[in-house]
Amino acid sequence: MKLYVGNIPRLADEESLAKWFERIGLRVESIQMVGKDEPGAIRKFAWVRIAEEVFPPKALRHLRQCMFWGQPLAVRKVNPGTARDSSSRSEASVNPTAA
């Protein structure tokens, strides 16, 4: 299953995000982190593929309440067949605040 994860602190990396998911009991298959590493850019977002195929809405709500580096994450399930589910470069142009 693929998740959109937003509100990631700028200094976080894929490894720290993967470890966070593993600590809460989810097995990460891949992470594609997107964000500007420029001064003034304070947040990143990522596409996270987890091994779990069934992910109840209650678990998604729980993820939104967990803190990562002192920040609540914006987590949404990416539905198959949407533009955001592709692995193309178009993902990098998605505005995470509009998602």
Image (cartoon, grey):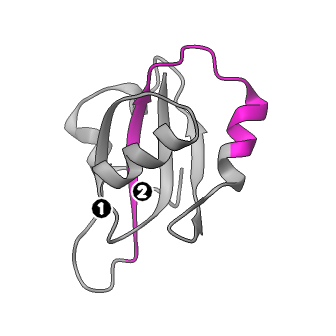
Mark 1 or 2, which is nearer the eye?
1
Residue at mark 2? 95
Q: Secondary structure at mark 1?
A: loop
Q: Which mark is residue 35?
A: 1
Residue 60 sits in quarter: top right
Q: Could you classify mark 2 by the number of other residues whose Cα lies within 10 Å: few (under 14), some (14-19), or many (20 or more)?
A: few
**How many numbered markers are drawn?**
2
Q: Is residue 71 left or right of residue 34?
A: right
| Spot occupied by residue 26 in the image (x, y as percentages of width and height) | 52, 31
| Spot occupied by residue 13 in the image (x, y as percentages of width and height) | 29, 58
**Quick one: which residue is furthest to the bottom in this view?**
40
| Spot occupied by residue 54 in the image (x, y as percentages of width and height) | 62, 15
**Quick one: which residue is furthest to the top in this view?**
53
* Residue 54 sits inside the magenta stretch: yes
* 72 over 61 or under it: above or below: below
* 73 over 80 or under it: above or below: below
Residue 38 sits in quarter: bottom left
Q: Secondary structure at mark 2?
A: loop
Separation (CA) of disc 1 from disc 2: 10 Å
Instruction: Work out whether residue 30 or residue 88 is closer to the camera in this orientation and state it.
Output: 30
Q: Report the magenta residues as a range.
A: 42-62
Q: Residue at x 71, y 33 (%)?
A: 59
Q: Amino acid at mark 2?
A: Asn
Q: Amino acid at mark 1?
A: Gly
Instruction: Work out whether residue 66 or residue 49 is closer to the camera in this orientation and state it.
Output: 66
* Residue 80 sits inside the magenta stretch: no
Instruction: Work out whether residue 10 or residue 41 is closer to the camera in this orientation and state it.
Output: 10
